[in-house]
């Protein structure tokens, strides 16, 4: 499979990618869409005419954001719904409250490098529960809504952090393997990439495809436990640049029907055989491996019933 390239790159913004694209009539969910690159993703999609649902853990905190967006985008079609990805009960409630078709699901929300091992209400390691399992359960629960859209996309926000760990299938919760903040984060982001592979493998015949992405190094609240960005200044992005790859995968006709790939800087990333030390990016084979994707897909269906 040839690597997919586009006219966009490292410095492209979400507005650049969506210029000339009309998303009127498209219903899109953005998890964590009220802050960071999720907010910039939401803003760009609204400007292109989409109807955007912000799925957020604290809806009351999103009120001001929504007011600002409505002031910036006259006639903006936007709503807020509660969603705590770490709690599968909240995910089920969100799914049960959804009706009608869904054209795009952007699995954007996440947490990073928790200093101590924590568990979700259902007993899963919290980064795995929030970054991956909650998004799996959300996607699974919305599969019929996606299928009814007639050509839906699921966007999975992974990270270069996936290069720090594959999915540890025999110890997902670090009950035996010593917990490290970045190791647990890496596992969750490898799982997120595998989700896109599995969605495409299992649901392409229903008109649903998915791709994963590394948004790049952007200063947001995500780094609250890491002391801020460690990336060289020339490799950092603005929020507008950080949202570019997300909206590319969500809405660009350049990716029509394409799935199971991993993108960064608005282009398909190269395979790497060891973790780069120069911040050059790329993806590890284990993060797009079909057997790994199918194994995690099967396991996740059981876990999501917890």
Image (spheres, grey):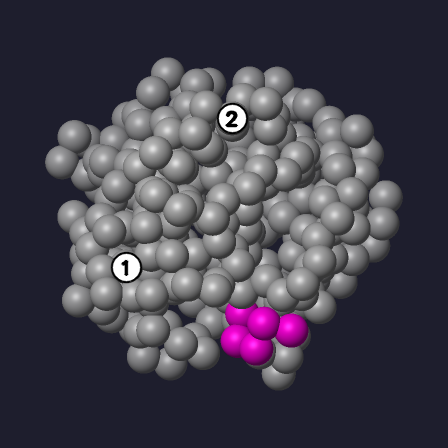
**What residue is drawn where x is 80% and y is 38%?**
89
Within 10 Å of disc 1 (Cα), the crowding (few <14, some 14-19, many 20+) is many
- Report the magenta stretch's main SS: loop
Region of the chain picked out in magenta, as a range: 148-152
**What residue is drawn where x is 86% and y is 44%?**
306
Q: Residue furthest front?
A: 75
- Do the CB atoms of the residues marked 2 and 1 lie less than 8 Å apart? no
- Left or right of residue 306: residue 299: left
- Left or right of residue 76: residue 79: right
The kind of secondary structure element at disc 1 is: helix
Q: CA distance from mark 2 to mark 1?
A: 26 Å
Question: Does residue 265 belong to the magenta stretch?
Answer: no
Q: How many numbered marks appear?
A: 2
Classify residue 81 by image quadrant.
top right
**What residue is drawn where x is 31% and y is 37%?**
72
Residue 70 drawn at (x, y percent):
39, 37
The kind of secondary structure element at disc 2 is: helix
Within 10 Å of disc 2 (Cα), the crowding (few <14, some 14-19, many 20+) is some
Residue 1 drawn at (x, y percent):
38, 81
In the image, residue 149 above or below residue 33: below
Please name whichever residue, 150 or 200, is drawn nearer the observer in this view of the structure. 150
In the image, residue 187 above or below residue 193: above
Residue 262 drawn at (x, y percent):
40, 61
Instruction: Identify the residue position indicated by label 1 in the image.
Output: 18
N-terminal of the pair, mark 2 or mark 1, is 1
Instruction: Identify the residue position indicated by label 2 in the image.
Output: 63
Q: Residue furthest right?
A: 306
Residue 286 drawn at (x, y percent):
51, 59
Does the rendering let one see residue 247? no
């Amino acid at each position: 499979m040839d690597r997919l390239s586009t006219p966009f790159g490292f410095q492209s913004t979400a507005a650049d990618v969506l210029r000339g694209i009309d998303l009127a009539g498209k219903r899109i969910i953005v998890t964590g869409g009220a802050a960071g690159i999720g907010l910039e993703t939401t803003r760009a999609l609204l400007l292109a005419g989409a109807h955007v649902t912000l799925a957020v853990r604290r809806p009351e905190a999103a009120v001001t954001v929504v007011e600002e967006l409505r002031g910036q985008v006259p006639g903006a079609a936007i709503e807020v719904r509660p969603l705590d990805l770490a709690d599968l009960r909240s995910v089920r409630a969100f799914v049960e409250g959804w009706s009608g078709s869904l054209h795009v699901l952007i699995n954007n929300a996440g947490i990073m490098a928790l200093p101590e091992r924590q568990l979700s209400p259902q007993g899963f390691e919290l980064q795995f529960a929030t970054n991956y399992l909650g998004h799996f359960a959300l996607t699974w629960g919305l599969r019929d809504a996606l299928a009814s859209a007639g050509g839906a996309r699921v966007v999975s926000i992974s990270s270069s952090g996936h290069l720090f760990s594959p999915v540890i299938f025999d110890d997902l919760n670090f009950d035996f393997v010593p917990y490290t903040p970045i190791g647990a984060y890496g596992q969750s982001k490898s799982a997120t990439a595998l989700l896109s592979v599995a969605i495409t493998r299992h649901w392409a015949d229903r008109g649903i495809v998915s791709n994963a992405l590394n948004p790049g190094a952007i200063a947001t609240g995500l780094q609250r436990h890491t002391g801020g960005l460690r990336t060289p200044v020339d490799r950092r992005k603005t929020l507008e640049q950080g949202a570019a790859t997300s909206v590319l995968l969500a809405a660009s006709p350049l990716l029509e029907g394409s799935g199971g790939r991993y993108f960064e800087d608005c282009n398909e990333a190269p395979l790497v055989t060891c973790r780069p030390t120069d911040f050059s990016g790329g993806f590890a084979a284990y993060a797009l491996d079909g057997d790994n994707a199918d194994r995690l897909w099967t396991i996740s269906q059981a876990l999501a019933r917890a």
